[in-house]
Image (cartoon, grey):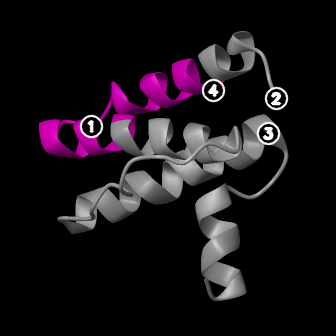
Amino acid sequence: MENSTGFSTFYSNVCNYLMHINDKRARQFGIRFAEYLQTKHRGLDPRARPKLESPAHRLVQIEVERIFREHYGMAAPEALETRSGR
């Protein structure tokens, strides 16, 4: 299990990205999605996966997954499940 500093750094990087998003709902989605990924990364059972409601949400999801990969050096848990057909 990782320490809270790892999450703080990841979350800070996500927030830095989201500051430049004008769409308030897309920003909120990005925060929920980052929290979802972090919960899965810790091996806990997260609440329901945040629902994609617009193309902007999909773009935010892609970028948050990229930040996750860059920060942790691995694919986001969400991406791994998609590839394995779960």
Kind of residue at disc 1:
Arg
Where residue 74 appears, as percent x and y from the top left, is 82, 52
Q: Is residue 47 left or right of residue 6?
A: left
Q: Nearer the viewer, mark 2 or mark 4?
A: 2
Kind of residue at disc 4:
Phe
Q: Earlier in the sequence, mark 4 or mark 1?
A: 4
Q: Which residues are magenta?
A: 10-31
Figure quadrant of the N terminus: top right
Measure how far apart labels 3 and 4 are at the Cα level. Answer: 8 Å
Label 3, residues with CA under 10 Å away: few <14, some 14-19, many ≥20: some
Q: Find disc 4 in the rendering and name its residue.
A: 10
Q: Find disc 3 in the rendering and name its residue.
A: 72
Q: Nearer the viewer, mark 1 or mark 2?
A: 2
Q: Find disc 2 in the rendering and name its residue.
A: 1
Q: Earlier in the sequence, mark 1 or mark 2?
A: 2
Q: Nearer the viewer, mark 3 or mark 2?
A: 2
Where residue 61 appears, as percent x and y from the top left, is 44, 56
Kind of residue at disc 2:
Met
Residue at figure coordinates x 39%, y 48% from the top left: 47
Q: Are marks 3 and 4 in contact (CB under 8 Å)?
A: yes
Q: Find disc 1 in the rendering and name its residue.
A: 27
Q: Residue furthest top?
A: 5
Secondary element at image label 2: loop
Where residue 13 appears, as percent x and y from the top left, is 57, 25
Measure how far apart labels 2 and 4 are at the Cα level. Answer: 15 Å
Kind of residue at disc 3:
Tyr
Measure how far apart labels 1 and 2 are at the Cα level. Answer: 27 Å
